[in-house]
Each structure stands twice: as structure tokens, then as C-alpha cells.
Image (cartoon, helix red, strand yellow):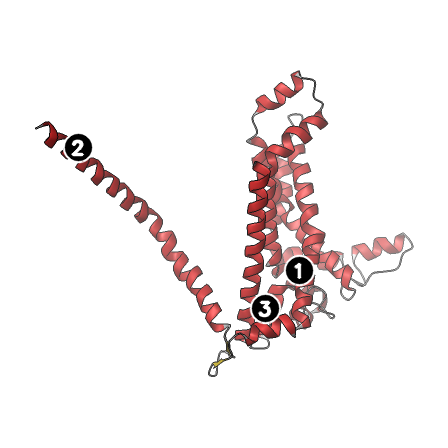
Amino acid sequence: MERKRRGGQAARRFNQRISDHISGYLYTLPFFAIFMVFGFYPMLYTIYISLFKWDMLGDRTFVGLRNYRLLLTDDPLFWKSIGNTFLIWFESVPFQILFAILLAVLLNQAFIKGKGVFRFFIFLPNITSLVAVSLIFANVFGVKYGLFNYLLTLLGLDRLDWAGDSWATQLAVAALVFWRYLGFHMVIQLAGLQSIPGDLYEAATIDGASKGQQFFRITIPMLTPTIMFSTLIATTGGLQLFTEPFTFMSDLSGAVAAVNGGTNNQVLTVVMYLYKTAFTDHAFGYSSAIANLLLIIIVIFALFNSLLVGKLRR
């Protein structure tokens, strides 16, 4: 009897575990079903299309890896778009993360009054229509009547061609990206700051640590995973930059210049080049190859970020 009773309990526990596993799979099934349809299948289809020469209307011609070979060895515009993407990233993201940390630390202080108001106004550009933001920046950086050129003339300096000069246009787009996403990263850093136990600061104060020592010895080390996460988000977003330079150039110089990333392709990012080859040049196989190479670059950055976070946590 005892053996039979124990056998019955084991069978019930086994059935309960099976039931729990099935429930878990059923709960996560909608996400994976949607991901397979709208994420995984398009990715596989893009890899498949990249092996063809195709204008979307006619027949496909199989060319193997020719699109990738042309991109890597015989397409200076592709490499220019890679360079532009990284330059705009370098001019915006490091400063964006740095200022986001400083603002978050400032707005986390007890003596600051009206924190909610400050947080709202700093976060506001992130939820403002990008078309409106680009229009404002196009007026601020206007060549003839822009605010910046007006200030330069007041200082006795020459006007800058924000629409034609390479570094000036990239700087203007970087300023737009910086301003738009600063609040977003500040909120992430603020959440990280508020998860740091207050006991650590109290113990450090009792031990005589100054505010600067507390910042560098407690805040920064404890905030490192949040900083790396924020950097990863900003990097993947920066590598896929499209709307900001496109709408900025469209408002400043017109639609044709926007498609080409400026008169000298000075803000032509990888995604803008992908868009141009697909919807202007109708080379869908070639644009698919660009998309796949961009995916590889993003995966490399994500892996590097994960390795770095793992190393810093040890």
C-alpha cells in the first residue's frame, strides 16, 4: 500500500511539472508566433533575396554572393555611408550618455525642487513629432536666416553652410539626435540610480567619503550595467539612423538631397543608402545585402557590449 501511495504522489508531481511546462510554453507562444511571422521570416527572406538581382517587378536572376562582393570591394558610397553613420554616432552618443548620467544624478538629489517638471521637459523631445523637431532644427541651422548663423555673424564670424559642408551638416544632425534622445537615456540612468541602496551612501558618509568619492566609488560602479545597456540601445539605434538625417535634409535642402544624404552624401547613413538602393534604384537584392551586412555589424556590437558588461561585473 505504501509503495502504491508513493507511486501515486510521484505520478501527480510528474503530471504537475508537465502541466507547468505546457502552461509556460502556451503563455510565451503568442510572442514567438508573432516574432516568427514578422521578424524571423523577413530576416530569412532578406538573406534569400540578397542572392539575386531583382527590381521587384521582373524575374529574379541568381547571382550568388556577387552583391556582397560588390558592396565590400567596389562600392565607395557604401563605405562612405558606414563612415558617416559612425561619425554621427561618435558626435552624438558618448556626449548623450555622459549628459544623461549627469542630469540623472542632479535630478536624483533631494534638494532639487520640482523634479517632475524638469524630467518632463527633458523627456519631452523624445515624444515630440520628429517632423516638427526636424523643422525646428532646419530653421535653427538655416544657411541664410538660421539662428546659429545669426549668432556667428554677431561674433564677427563667417556663416556656415549647414546644408553643404560635410562636418557642419553631420554636426547639425548629431545635435538633433543628441537633443531628441537625451531625455530617454536620462530616464534609464535615473531608474538605475534609484535602484542603488541608500545604505551604501550612508555608510560612505559615516566613513568620511566626499560627494566626489561617493560618485566615482559607488555611483559609477553600481550604475555600470545600466550605462552599458543605455550605450547598447543608443548604438543599435545610431547604426540604424534614418529618419533624423532624412527629415532634416528634406526640410533644409529638399527631397532629392534628402534621398542622397545631402549634396555631397555627407549624412548618407547605412539605412539611408539601403532605402536609396531599394526604392530609388530598385535594386532589392543589393539593398538586402546591405541590410544583412548591417545586421552583422549590429550583432558584433551587441556581442562586444555583452562581453564588456560581463567583464565589468566580475
Residue identified by numbered label 1: 85
Q: Are marks 1 and 3 in contact (CB under 8 Å)?
A: no
Q: Which residue position is annotated with label 3?
A: 274
Instruction: Give the residue number, with chain letter if any, for mark 2.
Output: 9
The furthest residue to the right: 156
Is 152 situated left or right of 305 in this image? right
Query: At 14% across and 34% down in the image, what residue appears?
Result: 7
Q: How many angstroms separate mark 1 from mark 3 (CA)?
A: 13 Å
How many C-alpha atoms fall within 10 Å of the one at disc 3: few (<14), some, or many (≥20)?
Answer: many
Mark pair 2, 1: CA separation? 62 Å
Q: Earlier in the sequence, mark 1 or mark 3?
A: 1
Mark 2 residue type = Gln
Q: Nearer the viewer, residue 49 or 58?
A: 49
Residue at 90% of width from left, 52% of height from top?
A: 155
Q: Is residue 164 above or below residue 3?
A: below
Circle 2 crowding by C-alpha within 10 Å: few under 14, some 14–19, many from 20: few
Residue 36 point in image, percent of width and height: 39, 59
Name the residue type under label 1.
Thr
